[in-house]
Amino acid sequence: MLFAVLFEDHAEHADELRRRHMDAHLQFLERNAAAIVAAGPLRHADGAADGGLWLVEANTHEQVERLVHDDPFWPTGLRKSVRILIWKQVFADGTRVGG
C-alpha cells in the first residue's frame, strides 16, 4: 500500500532544529529508501518552510507510524502534527495508472 505522510512543523526554532538534525534525518531516509520512496519539504508561497511530505510503501499504518517515530526529527519537537493517509495513484506522466 502507498501512504502519504504529511508533516506540519512548529515555526519556533524550526530552522535551527532542521539545520542541527538534517544530516541524521537524510541518513535515516537513505537507510529506509525501500519504504520511503519519496520525501521532501513543504513551503509556503513566500518560501517559508512548514513541514514535509513522504510517500511510503508499507503493508500497514503501524509500519508507517514506526518510521515516523524512528526519524531523528521526531524527538526534537520539530513536528507539530503528522497525518498518515492511504494514497492511490491514478495519474502519472500524462497517463492514467493503477486502474
Image (tube, grey):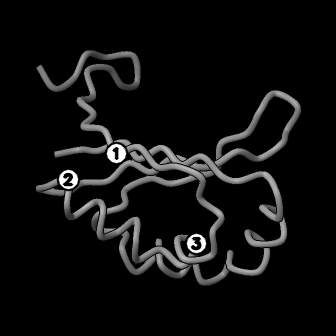
Classify 10 Å Cα crowding around label 3: few (below 14), some (14-19), many (20 and above). some
Residues tagged 2 and 1 counted as in contact (Cβ below 8 A): yes
Residue at 60 percent of width and 83 percent of height: 24
Residue at 34 percent of width and 45 percent of height: 84
Instruction: Give the amino acid at mark 2.
Output: His
- Residue 36 falls left or right of residue 51: left
Instruction: Give the amino acid at mark 3.
Output: Phe
Q: Which quadrant of the structure image shows residue 3?
A: top left
Q: Which residue is mark 2?
A: 61
Q: Which residue is mark 1?
A: 84
Q: CA distance from mark 2 to mark 1?
A: 7 Å
Q: Position of residue 89 (x, y in %)?
A: 27, 28
Q: Which residue is mark 3?
A: 73
Residue at 16 percent of width and 26 percent of height: 98
Instruction: Give the amino acid at mark 1.
Output: Ile
| Mark found first going from the N terminus, 2 or 3 | 2
